[in-house]
């Protein structure tokens, strides 16, 4: 069956059977992760059906970021994915079950599971790229708003004189996690895209710091230099 037909079937199933309120992890998110995965694996021998399936079901179980069992969500998602494939898509190749389940389990940052296959590395990179750039920026503030967290510490937005705390301030999440993602990328294509998108986040941080000082027409060059120097020294 052509890959596009599998994609259409997966989307139809999710639209009619998957109920959830997190708009940062909806079917549109799955579709974007799949599009990014296609870019990453364009010159590889990765199994496209494994990658597609993992992209569309990796967040089928999605626990809130402040849930005590958040780190178990991807394992639960892998189990639910296999259940769905077995009951709803009986024609899905059974010999691909293990590869799909591993890619789903390994995609999660909080789970800390190292990807062992090319397909799992591609899905992990593509999902993490969704956390960077313009979409990633929007998702950070969307999620923090849903959790009732302040956007930033106006007096010390970059935590120069305090501990980073992304459970309190949305902007802290940039340094706490997002700007560290490029070094975790598993593929060369993923690393290149991640570095590019991380630079966008740094530019945003520099612009925000300038505005907090009343400068709405410039950016904080010190911020750009600080994170540029960290990037090149890491």
Image (cartoon, rainbow, N blue to C red):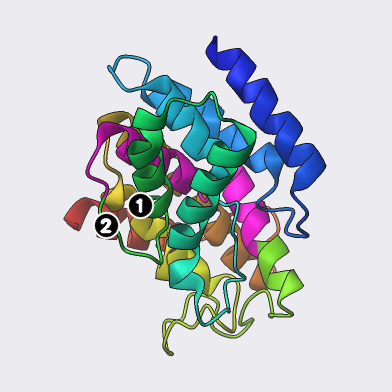
Q: Tag 2: Cα neighbours inside 10 Å, few (<14), some, or many (≥20)?
A: few
Q: 124 left or right of 172? A: left
Q: 126 left or right of 27? A: left
Can you identify the residue that label 2 sits on?
229
Instruction: Give the number of the mark in front: 2 or 1.
Output: 1
> What is the number of callouts on the image?
2
Horizontal and vertical percent position of residue 187 = 27, 35
Front residue of this view, candidates 151 and 108: 108
Q: 27 left or right of 82? A: right
First reached walking from the N terminus: tag 2 or tag 1: 1
Horizontal and vertical percent position of residue 229 = 27, 57
Q: Main secondary structure of the magenta part?
A: helix
How far apart marks 2 and 1 lie (CA) works out to 31 Å
Horizontal and vertical percent position of residue 203 = 52, 51
Can you identify the residue that label 1 sits on?
106
Residue at 46 percent of width and 81 percent of height? 159
Residue at 46 percent of width and 22 percent of height? 38
Front residue of this view, candidates 68 and 185: 68
Q: Is the Cβ of the residue at disc 2 closer than 8 Å to that at disc 1? A: no
- Name the element at disc 2: helix
Q: Residue furthest top?
A: 2
- Image quarter of residue 214: bottom right
Horizontal and vertical percent position of residue 206 = 53, 59
Q: Residue furthest bottom?
A: 162
**In this picture, is 55 found above or below 176?**
above
- Name the element at disc 1: helix
Front residue of this view, candidates 119 and 147: 119
Range of residues picked out in magenta: 115-140
């Amino acid at each position: 069956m052509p890959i596009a037909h599998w994609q259409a079937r997966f989307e139809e199933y999710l639209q009619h059977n998957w109920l959830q309120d997190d708009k940062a992890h909806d079917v549109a998110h799955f579709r974007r992760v799949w599009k990014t995965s296609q870019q990453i694996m364009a010159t590889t021998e990765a199994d496209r059906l494994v990658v597609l399936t993992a992209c569309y079901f990796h967040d089928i179980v999605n626990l809130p970021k402040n849930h005590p069992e958040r780190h178990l969500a991807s394992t639960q998602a892998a189990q639910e994915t296999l259940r769905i494939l077995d009951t709803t898509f009986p024609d899905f190749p059974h010999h691909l079950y293990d590869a799909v389940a591993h890619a789903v389990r390994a995609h999660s940052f909080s789970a800390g599971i190292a990807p062992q296959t090319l397909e799992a590395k591609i899905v992990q990179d593509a999902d993490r790229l969704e956390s960077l750039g313009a979409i990633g920026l929007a998702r950070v503030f969307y999620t923090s708003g849903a959790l009732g967290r302040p956007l930033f510490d106006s007096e010390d937005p970059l935590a120069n004189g305090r501990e980073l705390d992304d459970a309190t301030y949305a902007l802290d999440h940039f340094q706490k996690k997002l700007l560290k993602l490029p070094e975790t990328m598993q593929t060369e294509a993923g690393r290149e895209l991640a570095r590019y998108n991380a630079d966008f986040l740094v530019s945003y941080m520099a612009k925000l710091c300038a505005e907090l000082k009343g400068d709405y027409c410039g950016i904080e060059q010190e911020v750009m230099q600080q994170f540029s120097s960290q990037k090149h020294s890491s």
